[in-house]
Amino acid sequence: MSKAILLDFTKCIGCRACEKACAEEHRLPDDPPTDKLNYKNYTVVLQRGNQYFRKMCMHCQTPVCVSVCPVAALEKTSDGPVIYYPDKCMGCRYCMMACPFQIPKYEWEKPVPVIRKCIMCNKRVAEGLETACAWVCPTAATRFGDREKLIQIAERRFATFPGKYVEYLYGKNEVGGTSVIMLSGIPFEEMGFRMDLGTTALPELTWTVMSKIPNVVMTGGILLGGISWIIHRRMQIDQEAHSHDKDHGNGKGGGK
């Protein structure tokens, strides 16, 4: 059975224990921004009015980032997490452009950048453990478990606590469903979550279009994409070499 994370924002007290546990689990840098997602963090706690909420990868049931990656650097596991392989990533950033939640982040400051994002503690999940963020949460605002059971728990709360929640379970159906589902006391759009995504998995939409395009056009597109990537990487390398030469000439490397 596929696993998932249930985020109940009405229970969040803004302690940021989830951020710290995530950073320790994945050995992330200790100086991430606290107001947005970045390649240095996999989740961030934000605030809107009196409510705290989290931003993180939604781990789509049928992820479009996986479908657009030309080198299979991303994978949807049977357990639920969408994971990635940094050694395969070539930095094309197609996943960044395709993600409807704008989650993957690029290591702009690194000489050999790749994509970074939450991987839902896939190693812990494979060992039968809950995610680090769920394990550490002191108020059960973050829960981990079977997706269908978490949906049942969330929907029971609507009836048990009338008026406490916006009666909408975000992630149950968005883009075909996600492995992160959310409860909130304020409208989701007020926190910046898109409400216009529809219920069809995005790869199904793209496949419908692509299946009608002749193979010769697809081949040409792939070829042009490859040429574009090679040119881009050459420009990056030239720029890096130029920056290095400039630093060297300014004395940073002149001490030898």
Image (cartoon, rainbow, N blue to C red):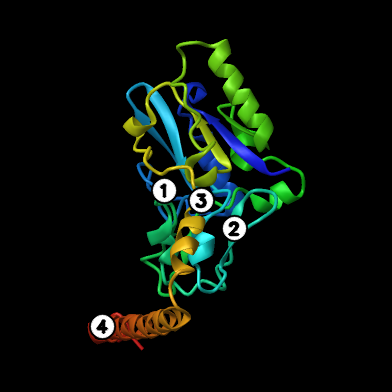
Residue 194 lies, in percent from the top left, at 37, 40
Residue of label 2 = 83
Closer to the N terminus: mark 2 or mark 4? 2
CB atoms of marks 3 and 4 within 8 Å: no
In front: label 3 or label 4: 3
Q: Is residue 28 positioned above or below 87 on the image?
A: above
Closer to the N terminus: mark 2 or mark 1? 2
- Amino acid at pointer 4: Gly
Observer-nearest residue: 248 or 106? Answer: 106
In front: label 3 or label 1: 3
Residue of label 4 = 251
Count residues near mark 4 (Cα–Cα under 10 Å), then give few for <14, some for 14-19, many for 20+: few
Count residues near mark 3 (Cα–Cα under 10 Å), then give few for <14, some for 14-19, many for 20+: many
Observer-nearest residue: 214 or 252? Answer: 214
CB atoms of marks 3 and 2 within 8 Å: no
Q: In this image, 246 relative to 40: left or right?
A: left
Instruction: Give the Cα distance between marks 2 and 1.
Output: 16 Å
Observer-nearest residue: 114 or 243? Answer: 114
- Amino acid at pointer 1: Phe
Q: In this image, 193 relative to 171: left or right?
A: left
Instruction: Give the Cα distance between marks 1 and 4.
Output: 44 Å
Residue of label 1 = 101
Count residues near mark 1 (Cα–Cα under 10 Å), then give few for <14, some for 14-19, many for 20+: some
Quadrant containing the N terminus is top right
Q: Secondary structure at mark 3?
A: loop
Residue at 40% x, 48% y: name it. Answer: 37
Q: Is residue 39 positioned above or below 219 on the image?
A: above
